[in-house]
Amino acid sequence: RTLCRFCNFNAWKYVATARSVAKSARLAHAAATLLDVPSVRLYQDSIFHKRPGDGPTPWHSDARMAPFDTSKMITFWINLQPVPDQEVGGTGLLFADGSHADFALPYWNGNDGHEYERLEERYSKTSHHMPMAVGDCTIHAGWTLHCADEAIDERMAYAVTFVDSKAEVREDASALQSKGDNEDRWSYSTWIEEVSPRRMFHHPAVPIVWPKMLMPKDLISDKAALEALTKLRSGNGKDVREAKEVLESSGTELAGGMTMTGNKGSRKQSNQINQDRAVILSPFSIEGSSSGSSLFDRNKRLLLLGDGHNHFGEVVSAFLCDELPTILADKLNNVQGRASKLTEEEILGETMEAIADAFEDIDTKGRLTLAPPSGGSTATLVLQLGKYAFVANCGDSTSFFATYNKNTGATEIIYTTREDKPELEDERHRIEEAGGSVMMPEDETSGEVPRVVGVDENGDFFWRHRHKPLHW
């Protein structure tokens, strides 16, 4: 047969199982790491069906078929059936090692010609990874030359391709005869006319999948989200799957973001500015060489939330989330640089000091940078470094830890930070010792909260708080 295989593009758009793989955080994170880029988009997925008697798949590179001008492209090729060794008819992929870096081949020889007929002589080594079990995966760069032998037995595989989110579309990509091969046209024809070449773009057909962007669901206006939460609680398999599809953009398998837009307690305020800001960084990057300490060389994640208050409070909470992660990363980098000379107990202590110092630095920087200074923000932070979690809190926002038992379905909150309310005796004493005053409402049922005012020696408003962060 001249047709060497059957290919079905973009199953992720209409098959839930394919979507769960193609858009999985684990796969997307691996792609970003291997490409050494901060974010990647899902270009396409492909189901390959090679039937007995189908001819060989010739040497080719995936990037030559794509509409992008980039070297940052990568494909995960996953077996859906066992693939025997090559000597007994296995039709897994064969790779020309190092071909992704062979710029001389297309430069001197164009895109076809005699040199492409002697690739096995040009490259000192071709490799494969057969035999392979169901679910085994090979990964190759977009410009890596690869091929497959003629099929003796049936073979099915699933491929997922990612590209740097900053990769630009070429001007010729929408033409009927582009500079590249046209096999992928079936895949990208649905969106190529809707994006501008040589520009950053966003399009739902080629979504950015890492870092995972969380868009909280609104519990007041989003009826579909409320129905999905009810289905989740039911435990019914079909209902749970449908609910997860609705809530996919709000989180992960284990957690999601919810909001109550425009609500202040039980009062609906449609014209109120949302002064809450939050950021989740996973992984949380701490620059520098390997520290020699497992505390810094394993999982690192940061969750930070600010609740702005008073006039321009939303500016302060946004400033907090924009600036504090960088300040903290710089301080942790200093600790990391000395980690090999410190005991684990010393590392933990210095890490807590770094967090506390970062809180004070952001307070100082905010006073120098932001104007007018009438607004403020709470701050609550959770930092994971390997097996340790650090919690820091400033004001009356709350962080908590919960455990989930998959066997029983039970969730238990095991730790909650204290809300530093001014009606607390020690908190009121701290404020008054610093020269401030606490005004309590006469009517405790009014719904008003205690107000705190402080003035420093220059007559400026202030609010300063330093608690030693907690870890375990």
Image (cartoon, rainbow, N blue to C red):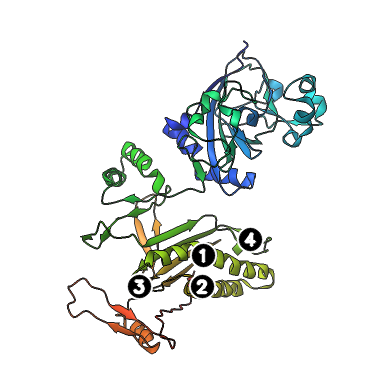
**Residue type, mark 3 in image:** Glu
**Residue annotated with mark 2:** 365
Rounded to the nearest angstrom, the CA distance separating label 1 from label 2 is: 9 Å
**Residue type, mark 2 in image:** Lys
Q: Is the C-beta separation of discs 3 and 4 under 8 Å?
A: no
Q: Nearer the viewer, mark 2 or mark 4?
A: 2
Rounded to the nearest angstrom, the CA distance separating label 2 from label 4 is: 22 Å
Residue 291, image x, y percentages: 67, 64
Residue 229, image x, y percentages: 30, 47
**Residue type, mark 1 in image:** Glu
Mark number, residue 287: 4
Q: Nearer the viewer, residue 263 or 470?
A: 263
**Residue type, mark 4 in image:** Glu
Q: Nearer the viewer, mark 3 or mark 4?
A: 4
**Residue annotated with mark 1:** 323
Up/down of 23 relative to 334, above or below: above
First in sequence: mark 2 or mark 4?
Answer: 4
First in sequence: mark 3 or mark 4?
Answer: 4
Rounded to the nearest angstrom, the CA distance separating label 2 from label 3 is: 24 Å
First in sequence: mark 2 or mark 3?
Answer: 2
Q: Tell me the quarter of the image containing the N terminus.
A: top right
**Residue annotated with mark 3:** 419
Q: Nearer the viewer, mark 2 or mark 3?
A: 2
